[in-house]
Amino acid sequence: MENLSGKKDTLFSNIKERISNNHLYKRFIREVEDIVEEVSYAPIVKKAKKVAVKAKVEVEDAIEDIKKDITEVAQTIKEKVTEITNTTAVKTDLKVINGIGPKLEQVLNDVGINNYAGLTKARKKDLQNILDQAGPRYRMHNPEDWKAQAKLALENKNI
C-alpha cells in the first residue's frame, strides 16, 4: 500500500502539468490505468467486491420482499376501505327507519344525529323534543321504535 500511496502522491501532484502538456497525456492515462489495475488486485478490494455483490443480492431480495408486503398491505387496505364504505353508507342512511324521510333525516342531522349509533343513544324524550322544536309538521311523528330499528340496522339485520 505504501508503494500505491507514493505513486498516487506523485501522480496527483503533477496532474495539472501533465494535462496541460498534451504530449504527456497518453503517458498520464497509462499511469492512471496501471494504478487502477494495481489497486483492483489488492486483497481488500477483492474482498470488498465480493461483499458488495453479496450485499447487492441481499438488498434486491429485501426490496422484492418489501414490494410483496406493500402489495399485500395495499390489498388489505383496499378490502377494508370497501367494507367500511359499503357498511358506512348503510349505517348513516336514517331514511331506512320507518317514519324518517329526507326532511326529518336533515332535522336529525342538524342536531348531531347522523347515524344509527347516534339514534340508538338518543333518549325517546330527547327525540320527541327535537320533533316538537322542528315544527308542527314533525310533531306527528312517533319516535317510539326508532331506537330499536336503528339498533337492528346497526347490526345489519332487516328492519
Image (cartoon, rainbow, N blue to C red):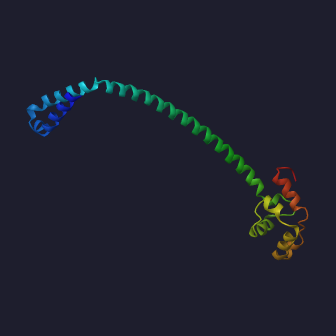
- Marks counted in the figure total 0
Q: Residue at x 83, y 57 (%)?
A: 96
Q: Position of residue 45 (x, y in %)?
A: 32, 27
- Left or right for 17, reference 8: left
Q: Position of residue 58 (x, y in %)?
A: 48, 30
Q: Position of residue 23 (x, y in %)?
A: 8, 32
- State which quadrant residue 121 falls in: bottom right
The N terminus, quarter of image: top left
**As drawn, 73 above or below 34:** below
149 lies left or right of 38: right
Which residue is nearer to you in this view: 16 or 1? 1
| Residue drawn at the location 64% of the way across and 44% of the way down | 77
Asked whether, in this view, residue 114 is left or right of residue 40, the answer is: right
Q: Residue 137 is drawn in which quadrant?
A: bottom right
Q: Name the quadrant containing residue 102.
A: bottom right
The residue closer to the viewer here, 30 or 52, is 52
Q: Residue at x 63, y 40 (%)?
A: 75
Please say if 6 is above or below 89.
above
Q: Residue at x 17, y 31 (%)?
A: 6
